[in-house]
Image (spheres, rainbow, N blue to C red):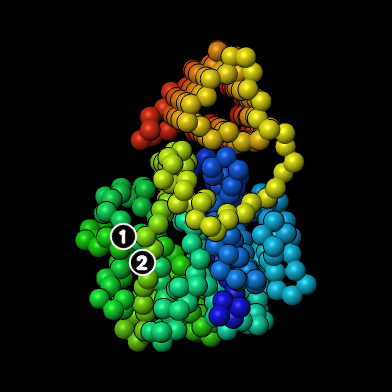
C-alpha cells in the first residue's frame, strides 16, 4: 500500500529560536545524538514504511544538508526509479529570489515534482519533530476512514511556552472516532493536549488544490492558510502516536532532546524498536580513552579522544577532550577540541570549535551556553 505514497519533506524551516545553531545550517541538518541529523529520522521512517520516492525542499543554508544526504545511498534511496530528490529553492520560478514565505509557496514552486510523481498519495512532513515510527498504520486508518487528510499527533501536557519559544504549535480538537473538528495554531491559551506532529497524508491532487488556493490569495502557510479555511469541508482525521517525540522549537528543546538520548527508555524508543534510524556512514576509528579518562553516562562518537572526565555528555565524531578537563551536561559537535584543565557545564559547542587550556564555561540546563561554529576561545 505504501508503494503508492511519495514523501515530501520541507527542510526550509526557519526557526530563530535556535539562534547560533541555525546560522549556517537548516533545522533539518541539526546534529543529534552523536552521529545523526534531524532529517535522518524522517527519511528512515519513510524508508522503513516502504516509501521509495522522497523529495526534500530546501531553502537557505542547505549546503551541509546536501553534503549529508548525497545521492541518498545510506537510506537506500539511490535508485534508477524513484529515489531521493533534493529540490533547490525556486527551481521553477525565475521571478522570485530570496526566501519562501511559507510551505505552500515552497510546494507551489516545486509543483512539477509533485505532478510527475507516479504515486497517488503524498506524505507531507516538516523537519523539526524527532520520533521513530512507520506510516503503515496511518495509511490503513486513512483508507478505512475514507479521509481526505490524516494527521499524526501525540498527547503532551500543555507547556506554557513564551512567545520567544513557541514554534508552529498546532493543537487539535479530536472526536472519539478520530475526526478533527478544530485546530489552534500557535495559541498561548489552548487547553488541548493533542499536539500535531507536522505529518499529513493526503491525495496529491488535494495537496495541489490546497496549495494553489492558498497561494492565489497570497497566503503561504499550510495549517492556518490552506488547512484551517477548508477544515469544515474536508474529512480530516488524526492518529495518536504513543512513542517518544521531541520538537526542535527552541534552544532549550535542542539541548533537552540530546540529554533525553542519554536515558535508556528514550534510546530504546528511538533506536531499538526494530526500525533502524539510518545516517551517513563515515569511516572513523573507535573512540580512544587515554590514561586520565573517566566517562559516565555519555554518548561518544567514533574518532573521539578522551583524556578528561565527562559526565552526561553527547560527543560527536572526532572530538578531543584534554587532560584534567571536566565536562558535565555538554553537547560537543564534530571535530571540536577542548584543551587541558578546562571546566564546561551545560554548554553546546558547535563544529570545529577550539577551547584553549584553562577555560571555564558555565551555562544552565534551562538556558545552555552556545559557542558558535569554528570559534576559538
Label 1's element? strand
Q: Of 286 and 172, which appears nearest the observer? A: 286
Question: In x, y percent, where is residue 343?
Answer: 49, 18
Q: Of 233 and 54, which appears nearest the observer? A: 54
Question: In x, y percent, where is residue 139?
Answer: 47, 77
Question: Residue, x 54% and y 52% (percent of image)?
Answer: 38
Contact between marks 1 and 2 (CB within 8 A): the answer is yes
- Residue bearing mark 1: 155
Does residue 360 appear to the left or right of 302 in the view shown? left
Question: In x, y percent, where is residue 306?
Answer: 61, 23
CA separation in Å, label 1 and label 2: 7 Å
- Residue bearing mark 2: 240
Question: Residue, x 54% and y 35% (percent of image)?
Answer: 299
Q: Of 297 and 79, which appears nearest the observer? A: 297
Q: Hey, which quadrant is residue 94 in on the image? A: bottom right
Above-or-below relation of 284 to 267: above
Quarter of the image where the N terminus is located: bottom right
Amino acid at each position: 500500500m505504501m508503494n503508492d505514497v511519495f514523501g515530501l519533506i520541507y527542510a526550509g524551516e526557519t526557526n530563530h529560536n535556535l539562534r547560533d545553531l541555525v546560522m549556517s545550517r537548516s533545522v533539518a541538518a541539526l546534529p543529534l545524538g552523536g552521529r545523526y541529523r534531524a532529517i535522518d529520522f524522517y527519511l528512515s521512517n519513510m524508508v522503513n514504511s516502504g516509501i521509495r520516492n522522497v523529495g526534500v525542499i530546501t531553502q537557505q543554508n542547505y549546503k551541509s544538508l546536501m553534503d549529508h544526504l548525497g545521492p541518498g545511498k545510506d537510506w537506500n534511496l539511490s535508485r534508477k526509479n524513484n529515489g531521493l530528490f533534493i529540490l533547490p529553492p525556486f527551481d521553477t520560478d525565475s521571478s522570485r529570489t530570496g526566501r519562501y514565505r511559507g510551505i505552500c509557496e515552497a510546494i507551489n514552486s516545486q509543483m512539477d515534482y509533485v505532478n510527475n510523481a507516479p504515486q497517488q498519495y503524498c506524505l507531507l512532513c516538516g523537519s523539526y519533530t524527532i520520533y521513530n515510527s512507520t506510516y503503515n498504520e496511518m495509511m490503513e486508518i486513512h483508507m478505512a476512514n475514507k479521509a481526505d487528510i490524516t494527521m499524526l499527533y501525540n498527547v503532551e501536557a500543555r507547556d506554557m511556552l513564551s512567545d520567544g519559544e513557541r514554534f508552529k504549535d498546532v493543537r487539535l480538537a479530536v472526536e472519539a472516532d478520530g475526526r478533527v473538528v478544530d485546530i489552534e495554531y500557535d495559541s498561548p491559551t489552548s487547553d488541548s493536549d493533542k499536539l500535531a506532529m507536522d505529518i499529513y497524508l493526503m491525495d496529491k491532487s488535494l495537496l495541489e488544490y490546497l496549495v494553489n488556493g492558498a497561494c492565489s490569495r497570497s497566503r503561504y502557510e499550510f495549517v492556518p492558510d490552506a488547512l484551517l479555511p477548508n477544515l469544515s469541508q474536508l474529512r480530516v482525521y488524526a492518529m495518536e502516536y504513543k512513542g517518544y517525540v521531541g520538537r526542535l522549537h527552541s534552544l532549550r528543546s535542542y539541548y533537552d532532546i540530546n540529554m533525553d538520548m542519554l536515558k535508556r527508555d528514550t534510546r530504546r524508543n528511538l533506536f531499538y524498536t526494530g526500525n533502524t534510524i539510518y545516517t551517513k556512514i563515515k569511516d572513523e576509528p573507535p573512540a580512544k580513552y587515554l590514561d586520565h579518562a573517566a566517562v559516565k553516562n555519555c554518548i561518544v562518537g567514533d574518532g573521539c579522544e578522551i583524556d578528561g572526565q565527562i559526565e552526561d555528555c553527547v560527543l560527536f565524531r572526532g572530538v578531543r577532550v584534554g587532560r584534567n578537563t571536566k565536562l558535565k551536561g555538554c553537547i560537543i559537535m564534530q571535530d571540536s577540541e577542548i584543551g587541558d584543565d578546562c571546566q564546561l557545564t551545560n554548554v553546546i559547542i558547535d563544529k570545529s570549535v577550539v577551547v584553549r587550556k584553562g577555560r571555564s564555561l558555565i551555562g544552565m540546563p534551562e538556558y545552555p551556553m552556545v559557542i558558535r561554529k569554528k570559534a576559538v576561545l
